[in-house]
Image (spheres, coloured by chain):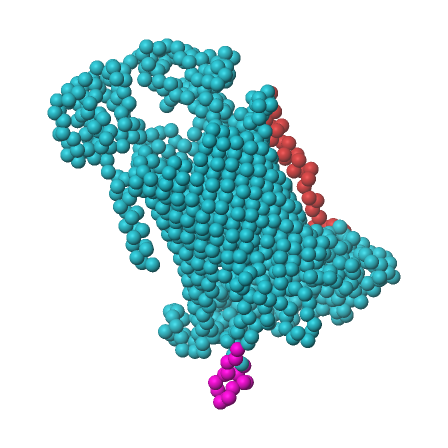
Amino acid sequence: MKRIFAISFFTLVLSLLTAQAQVLTLNVNDKPLRDVLPMVEQQSDYHFFYNSSLAGLDSRVTISLNSTPIEQALRQLFSGTGITYRITDNHVIVLTAEEKKSTTRQISGTVLDKATNEPVIGASVIIRGTTQGTITDYDGQFILDNVANGQYIECAYLGYETQDIRVTANADSYKVFMVESTAQLDEVVVVGYGAQKKVNLTGAVSVVDQKDIVGRPTPNMVTALQGADPALNITMSAGGPGASYNYNIRGLASINNSSTTKPLVLVDGVEMDLSRINSNDIESVSILKDASASAIYGSKAAAGVILVTTKSGSEGKAPQVTVDAKAGWKSPTTEHDFITQGFWSAYISDIFMMQHTKTAMTTYSDADYAELWMRLNDVTENPERPWTVVQNDGSYKYYANFDWYNHYYKTIRPMQDYNVSLKGGNEKVNYFVSARYYTEDGMIRIDNDKWHQISTRAKVNVNIQPWMHYGVNFSFFSSRYTYPGTTSSREIFRVGSLHAMAYIPATNPDGSAVYLNPWIYSGQGTVGDGMNALLLYGKHKNLNINREMVMQHMLTFDLAKNLTLNADYSLTWRMKEISNRSVKVPYSAKEGTTDLIENFRSVDTYHQQLARYMTHNYNVYLRWSPTWDKHHLTLTAGYNGEMYRYHSLEAERMDLMTENLSSFNFAKGEVNDLSESIKTAATNGFFARVNYDWNGRYLFEVSVRADASSRFAPGYRWAVTPGGSVGWRMSEEPFWESIHDWWDNAKIRLSAGQLANQMTGYYDYIQSVDADGMFTQAITLDGATVLSYATESDPNAGTLTWEKMTTYDAGLDLGFLGNRLSFTGDLYIRNTEGMLNTGTALPSVYGATDPKQNSANMSTKGWEFAITWRDKHRVAGKDLSYEISGGVGNYKTFITKYNNPEKLLSTYYEGQELGELWGYEIDGLFADQKEVDEYLTKVDPVNSMVYTDIVGVLDSKAPGLHPGDVRYVDLNGDGVITSGNNTVDNPGDRKIIGNTLPKYNYNFHLSAEWYGVDLSIYFQGIGRRDWYPMTEATTFWGPYSRPYQGFMEKNFMSNVWSEDNPDAYFPRYRAYEALGSANSLGPTNNRYTLNVGYLRLKNVTIGYTLPCWKKVFSEFRLYFSAENPWCWSPLQKYCRSIDPEQAVVSSQAITYGFARSFTFGLTATF
Amino acid sequence: MQKQLYILLLLVPVLFCACTDKKGVTLPTFSDIHVSPEQAVYHVGDSVVCTIDMLTPGDASLKAATYWFYTSWWGSNPNLTADFQTPETVDGATRFTSSKIELAQAGEVRIYFWGRLEYPNWDFQPIQIPVTLHVE
């Protein structure tokens, strides 16, 4: 390992040193200058441009140089010749002193289309480096004043390549011939094992523009890619740093292992995690959406492929350094205007609780309420009215107005991001090196969590011989996340608000932590389940470290004309370290006393996990791309192999000798865990692809891949995945000529292909023995030593094999008005067959779980399209270029085969639409007792499954149905509200009321650039997605879930039914109605199913490239960028403290808060 | 002319806001607190009785009201709690009379008359009327 690293590093340094050699050694005695210049060119990267009739070129030169820097050598060389020169990049432009001093004058000209000789109307004509310019008239003519000899005139028009002409002393009139731009048509897209012209693509491939990703104030590529393409669905698991994420292309590819059946992400051909890629390194991103495009990647490409290409150095470029630095802050995307007045927190919990059990939540008397009322507007403690009153027995009584949210969490937290890159090269070597440091403070205020991230990349390509090329690509990523609290950083969001009522402060007057609240009906409430005391004590420490190194070596041999052999090897090494320290946590319940919290979070333990991942990847492939006349052929064929090994060690031991140091050396107590895990896997694959086109008009592509996976039993390991596509560029047909001047491009694409999914378990086909079991303390032979035991897993089906996905795609690409307006759209069908699920039911005498089989199928149908308009206009003497683009996509997935003959709703069934939401129907709230009485004549609430507490808790203040309660509809008319047999045929009173999968994924983007000012506005959204807030979605349900939940929006009660507020959203106030699954708000129903679709301003960036300091910086840009600054969702009508994306992470919507960021930055290139 | 136009434009949002302003409830009004015995300087250990009259009853939508007297030195004492009031009609006026309050602290101390009024839609409104006594 170390050796590989050393060799790569040495190669890298050597390459960089070679690239920097720019000195001259020359001995010339009395030779004409014109003969010396070629000698300089031979020794350096510099090239001379001059008029051969210049008199000074015949000056005789005598010079002796020895490793003299090039600039100094040129000064000596031209000294005394009467010639001046100017250096631009590696070009030396030779001028006479006379030319430099020439005066200005008027010139005129005509701009013509080179192909048609027609005048180009409205073309911009400007003097380079100035703001002086004009546009051509109806005849394509222009006149420019004050033009000096030697100046360059730039002629530009959309759809044409920009032309430069040099003004010379002997011409006052010029003809400029514009050549139609083929840049858009020649745009090259990276595809599997190669690249193709975009116009020749026949598969469904979309490209994400690097300018939409680079420079965004996001820690990684994942959030930058969100919404970049309507087919790409990315869901973050949380908003915190290093949060995991789920993503798919065109929906779920399989019902199994949705977390592992992800699109394959290849960075320069090596599999990587999107979250560990520096978005500033990105050159391009291609999304291969259909099977024909992805088929060449075989087994891992079942869910599509995302190809990321990083930047490289360029030949003939001087070293170029780019520095990008930005700093700013993050804040929550949602409002957190929670109740912070102790009176209201106590009052609401009490009235809700009394409706449930007749007992108030608190034991506060009228006098206590008076105390709370008098403090109602005390933002800080008034000395007359302290928030904590010591009772006669030393215990504390609380009358606070405490802001628990701001106690736990920061709403403004700083972030910084620094990037530096160096690139350049010559004809022998080119290089790109980058480094990044990113840091942000987390949102946990006490013992603040922090995220640090470093990433570096070095790419060097060396032309060893004209026919042999070597490349090395090295990247390293390291992240470090430290956080307080318990092992799961999410836990604080789940339990932190429980019993954290505004009338309770976080600390007692003596500074001790508050943990117990004895002033509730049950005797004691545990504030934040101990999380408050735990955080204040500050001894719980957690550390997550991730390190990943990827080293790739590539060799390319040009064996013959159009025939290359490529070979590469990459090693991906990843290390994960997790350590968690917890201690016993003190608190005080009486003045002068300290106790220790007695729960599972307050134990003295140290836990550590060390995991190592290693992947070796090999590719060898040939590419032959001959051209005969109008026939273009490309053959690609090769081998790909991969070996993977995972090794993890995990240990936990109790009772350390000190709270301040965490090491197993200090642990003397019980060993809770000491385990090891090893997993290995290997795949071998052979692939081939043929691309053929005739004159860019008729396009064909066929590919095939054969893969073998170690995850299946011998005999079931191989899978062959074929793919094919055809394309017809109608716009290249002769009959198109008449409309070609406004309709530039029209292409129809058709493709079909099959992919295979191996993402089952590593050893699912082998029955395993688990030797990890330990009997309880009661089972010993000697009364002391606990016995261990082994268990055998349920028998497996040895015939398990690949899941197969077959995709059919029809696409249309159009371009109009000089390709200013473009359209691309696709319709697709994807059939997944052989998904693993419980196969044929076996008789109960079998005695074990029925083994899984490749027995389930599903089908996805969808569409997506994108439209782009890009144009350029001359405004106030400067080009205003702008682009408006947008895209939308949607899909539906149905289960077409599943072993569920009874069509139970508890699992998948044939005909089911994926994501469908079954629920009851509520047609409103009972307006008055008459409506209740009438309902009771038809429906029996006692034997229903939705009114359990209302009719069951007879000791409540108002048992039974009352005005303001929800009215469930008896859909099947059987007199009770039930779920029937929980089958499709008998769902009781339920029906399909929505769908939890995202519908109509869309984006639109506006960018413009004018006078050095650039603006980018990027919206992204989901048209519809249904979410039912489940039992613990406490910030939505408030006291309907738990009456002791501390975070309640200030306007919550305005949505609660009362006789004064009969049209309210929420029903009659009553605690626990949302918590119990058979209570009135627990079961999924239509009234409280929310559309969490959203429209989000994903990014807005405004920058200004300063026109000054051009001698030092080729670019100096200042900018402001905001990520997620604004969001609209129907959800916000009833709940503004839950982000719509946060809602779908879990039905409880309890996660690390999603963040928006605002940054100021500068980019300097020199 | 242009000036008038600008003023008019500035007034539009003001008028709009005025039109959409939420209607508030009319609270009852009270007299000042009358302290008996009335004297310029009190001494620690003196006892006083406070009275206050309701002058107007306020909005008829009032659902419930709770009134009490309280002092600036009771807040940290768990044994001294709000002196809740039941109004009585005296000479046609609605009057609240405190229990005997013993002045326990020297300095500028305050006695408050507090009220919590409950209107529909959980619209709770406060009444807070203080009187300051000089205690030596």
Per the rendering, the colour in which chain A appears is: cyan
Q: Is residue A875 above or below residue A362?
A: above
Point 66% across, 35% down: residue: B16
Point 60% across, 39% down: residue: A750
Identify which residue, A585 or A360, lies in the foreground. A585
Say if residue A260 shows up in the picture. Answer: no
Identify which residue, A706 or A893, lies in the foreground. A706
Classify residue A1074 by image quadrant.
bottom right
Q: Position of residue A476 (x, y in %)?
A: 38, 52
Classify residue A231 by image quadrant.
top right
From the image, which quarter does the N terminus of chain A lie in?
bottom left
Q: Position of residue A477 (x, y in %)?
A: 40, 53
Q: Furthest-bottom residue in view?
A: A782
Point 30% across, 47% down: residue: A12
Q: Is residue B86 above or below residue A306?
A: below
Q: Is residue A952 left or right of residue A86?
A: right
Identify which residue, A778 or A1103, lies in the foreground. A778
Image: magenta residue range: A776-790
The chain letter corresponding to red is B
Say if residue A740 shows up in the picture. Answer: yes
Q: Position of residue A435 (x, y in %)?
A: 36, 47
From the image, which quarter does the C terminus of chain A lie in?
top left
> Which is the main secondary structure of the residues drawn in magenta?
loop
Q: Is residue A24 above or below residue A736?
A: below
